[in-house]
Amino acid sequence: MFGVNAERATYWIGVTCLTALFLGAMNYSSLNMGGSGVQVPYNLFAWLVATLFVLTAIVHIFVVRTLRFHVSTVYYLGAILCLFLPLLWTDRLFLDVEALRIAGTLAGIAFLLAAQQFFGAESRKLLLSILLMSTLIQSFWGLLQYYFIFERSFLFWSAHQSRPYGVFQQVNVYAVYITLGSMLVLHFLADLNKKSTGMICAVAAVLLLNSHLMTLSEASTARAVGFVSVAAYLLYFALCRAFSKSVILLFFGAVCLGTFAPKTMFDVRPSTAKVAPLEVERLVVDTPVSKSVSAVADAGPESRFGTRPTIYAVAVDMIKDEPFFGHGIGSFRKQYLLYQGEYLKKNPAAEAEFNLSHPHNEIFYWVIELGVFTIFGFILVLVAWAVGVKSKFLDLRILLLATPLVLQSMLELPFYHSVAHYLGFMLILVVSMNASGVRSFRIPRWPFAVIGPLVGWSLWKIWIFLLSTYFALTMFLLFNAGGRVDVKPLLKINNPSAFKLRHEFELFQWKFREARKAGEMDLVDINNYLMWAFSTTQYAPMQTTYENFVTSLVLVGKKEAARRYLNEGLLMYPRNEKLRAFDAQLSEMERGSG
């Protein structure tokens, strides 16, 4: 029924999807509200193409009647099981809050399994070439952004900033991605039997350019990660004698020159764009994603290591208190602030974070929320790599390409900011799989009568979700562009799932602004806000919410509750001037009533 032509057709459709994913969908981003994960526009487009790729893989399995499975995948699936198994016995109160995180994790595994159906060791150069071109596009993008494009435009919406971001929204995420490009050019050159002088110079130029872009971007952690990763890869090639000593020194010198040459030597931009103070104040008051101005102002001079010493010290305290069961999925934001508040009592001069959704270490994140059992998931991945390399099931040279991504996940949260990093990591895992570890299973076609329609329906629902999410983003931008006056764009949103907290927050803020204009407050709106504020402060506390929450409780005469939540707010946000002022006012009211 199906022949070789059908098999080739599905294969090349898969290649086309992968090419469109890394060269197209991941290399465009328009104006948006920031955020991470599914909320970033290029991630939306990338997931659309990724779901099409998975669907093509399922069709491919149906055509060839063979399921390909690498032995290392057993370890990876076991790792995912270890991460999610604690959900059976830990607190699941805020499970729905983390639905997108769980779905994204499983989607990455689906991508990993799908890629195995098409590609093997014979496809390595093709896949790595696609990945390399994707990183080089970002290098070129960053070069244009800094040296030639000084004003925001259709393609370069962040070009007015004084740092190159590429398509990404965070400089460390950008720097790690182009570091991957540096390692890929080294890999391709090492694979060549004859290395001409021109090729060696071209690779040195890419290493210099990418290191230079990291310096221009002022990336902190990624700059160190990039330098260590490329240096380690060069050391590996030196031990393997893939390059001569002179070539190794040339490459290392290029990396050092790009990394350590001061940015002031290349300050060609006409001016440094800064947000006016009044606009900062407006953003702080009206958005749930910003620190308060007072908190930033009172934080004192930033230490050499930023806030990480505080973050990691607090994270360790959290793990000590709940090592086995964790604090519950979705609980990190609230629990971190409570623990940090106690930490700041003992260390008042310490740097602090007041809007943190991740401890900047992937292992800490899972252990804090779901307990130490999740560590076995990470151990299984390491075991898979060690056993795979020793048994020749995995190619160490390719596996090392994931070094910057892995290291950065211990210091930042690149996989949550960028699907390019997450699926790029999965693709590296697939490319590192040697043919000796592949197992093929013959399967009948009859299960597809049930599985096929179910999968097709599921992927269609995903597409609808992503497109409606993009529509929601468009409405938010329209609402912001209108000065947050006309609420109609917000009311048109039919799928606020990815922006649920932001959507509800903006609606309440609009109602309160309208009430202030009219000079009266609707008691129903106040009570609705109180219920919403109580709910959201349990899993996604914000300084502005606490300020409005305490004020609203006083307005309706619930002074005891106001005092209770004010004390909680002061513990979490000890540097918030408004909460301090409320404390003084409420204390005076309490003395008067006493």
Image (cartoon, rainbow, N blue to C red):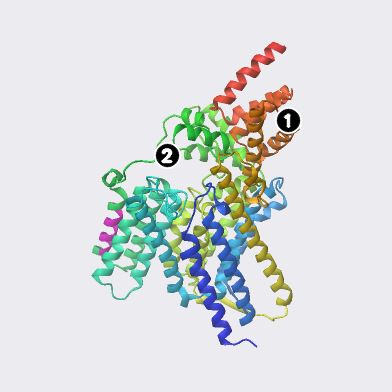
Query: Would you say the residues marked 1 and 2 are in contact, meaning their CB atoms lie under 8 Å apart?
Result: no
Question: Image point 66% across, 55% down: which residue?
Answer: 84
Q: What residue span does the magenta drawing correspond to? A: 247-256
In this rendering, the answer to whether 263 lies above or below 530 is below
Secondary structure under tag 1 reads loop
Left or right: where 500 falls relative to 416: right
Q: Which residue bears the numbered disc 1?
A: 522
* Point 32% across, 56% down: residue: 209
* Residue 89 visible, this orientation: yes
Residue 506 drawn at (x, y percent): 62, 40
Label number found at residue 305: 2
Spot occupied by residue 134 in the image (x, y as percentages of width and height) = 43, 63
Tell me residue 244's x, y (percent): 26, 67
Q: Amino acid at mark 2?
A: Phe
- Amino acid type at image mark 1: Asp
Count numbered badges in the picture.
Answer: 2
- Asked if residue 251 lies in the magenta stretch, the reply is yes
Q: Is residue 568 visible?
A: no
